[in-house]
Image (cartoon, grey):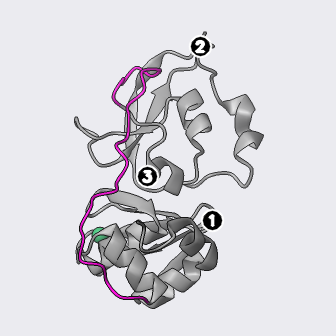
Amino acid sequence: MPYVDFNELKQRFKTEKVAELLGLQLKQSGQALRGPCPACQSGGERAIVITPAKGVFFCFAAREGGDLIQLAAHIRKCDVKDAAAWLDGGTVPSKKEDSREPSSPKGNSSLAYLEHDHVAVEALGFTAADAKALGIGYAPKGILRGTVAVPVRLEDGTLAGYIGITEAKLPPRWHGIATNVVPLPKRA
Ligand SMILES: [Zn+2]
């Protein structure tokens, strides 16, 4: 049934190769690549963030993200199957199907709707586990909609609020700053 083996494609194509094929103008920014989005033509020079190590992207102009095949779909404004076929160099199948996975909000933060395993969170360099532990998540709604919400805490750990970020300057080793992080209560 599948026209193209998505997993095989992802192994075959490096992020840089996909970006080159798509004609993206990316600049290194920490562990990520940033650049304007030719599909959205908005959001400025840093609209798109791609993390090669994880093979994921997020477009802050469109508030869309995903894997490299979804990146190709976003830039080429087609569905993922067409994008995969395009990457594969094969013929474009006519059947259309939305294979995007629904993301499920998890309830371990004060803003219950924050999505810790959202691709935008991952694209900024956090693992889903770290994001969940730290209460960091993508905001699909509310005042921080379209950004990654990071909790701001008082010295005693009280949650003071959130800031919405589209950029992250992470220390080289994320876990190296554990002493600066107020741990959340352990979940059962
Ligand atoms: Zn875009």
Q: Amino acid under label 2?
A: Arg
The reply to whether discs 3 and 2 touch (Cβ–Cβ < 8 Å) is no
Is 144 situated left or right of 184 in this image?
A: left
Between the C-alphas of marks 3 and 1, the distance is 14 Å
Residue on which the image places disc 3: 120
Where are the magenta residues, as a range?
90-113
Mark nearer the N terminus (3 vs 2): 3
Q: Which residue occupies the foreground of this view, 125 or 187?
A: 187
Q: Is residue 98 magenta?
A: yes
Q: Quadrant of residue 57?
A: bottom left
Residue on which the image places disc 1: 31
Residue on which the image places disc 2: 187
Q: Quadrant of residue 141?
A: top left
Is 11 situated left or right of 79 in this image?
A: right
- Residue 6 horizontal/vertical position (percent): 50, 68
Q: Which residue occupies the foreground of this view, 12 or 174?
A: 12
